[in-house]
Image: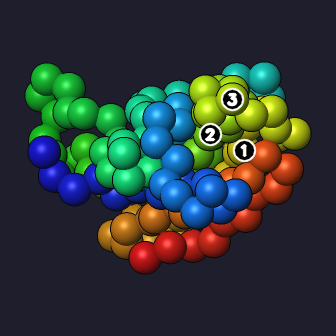
Amino acid sequence: MSKSPITCHVLDSSLGKPAAGVHVRLQEYNPVAEAAAALEPLVEGYTDSDGRCMQLWPKATEGQSKEELAKLKAGVMYKVFFKTKDYFEGTGRKCFYPWVEITFEVQDPDQHYHIPLLISPYSYTTYRGS
């Protein structure tokens, strides 16, 4: 499989460790759809033992080339949705933010988009990774 054009990395800054097992969903914004259904799910996954989800892109369907599949769309907005409550409950802790949503717009579909997320039970931060 070709390299995923979107990846993420989740770090638990309160422990200073990767956040393994965080449920992650990638969605694509569809401006034509009604507001309630404007975000279409593309793929779901979980962070690995290093807190990374390196294959955050749909797999090829029959008749679809790898080149077609690996292409982001310029000017399209995507959202990465992280289920942080499930992660914190799994580590025996409560949290204030049950999920984190990061929406971004693709300017150059040939670039790689890496979405780092630093979480703690009562805060989170993100930035454009490389």
Residue drawn at x 12%, y 28% is: 63
- Tell me the quarter of the picture where residue 99 sits: top right
Residue 41: x %, y % from top left: 53, 28
Q: Amino acid at mark 2?
A: Phe
Q: Which mark is residue 100?
A: 1
Disc 3: CA contacts within 10 A as few (<14), some (14-19) or many (>=20): few
Q: Is residue 122 left or right of residue 43?
A: right
- Look at mark 2 in the image and give the residue it sits on: 82
- Residue type, label 1: Val
Determine whether label 1 and label 2 are within 8 Å by CB.
yes
Q: Quadrant of the N terminus?
A: top left
CB under 8 Å between discs 1 and 3: no
- Residue under numbered circle 3: 92
Q: Secondary structure at mark 2?
A: strand
Q: Earlier in the sequence, mark 1 or mark 2?
A: 2
> In what element is the residue under mark 1?
strand
The structure residue drawn at horizontal position 61% and vertical position 46%, both measured from the top left corner, is 79
Q: Is residue 105 visible?
A: no
Residue 108 visible from this viewpoint:
yes
Residue at x 57% of width, y 73% of height: 128
| Amino acid at the residue labelled 3 | Gly
Q: Nearer the viewer, residue 58 or 63?
A: 58
Residue 16 sits above or below residue 120 on the image: below
Is 110 displayed left or right of 88 in the figure?
left
Mark toward the viewer: 1 or 3 = 3
Question: In screen coordinates, is 43 left or right of 107?
Answer: left
At 46% from the left edge and 64% from the top edge, which residue is drawn?
A: 114
Would you identify the image quadrant in which residue 130 lies? Answer: bottom left
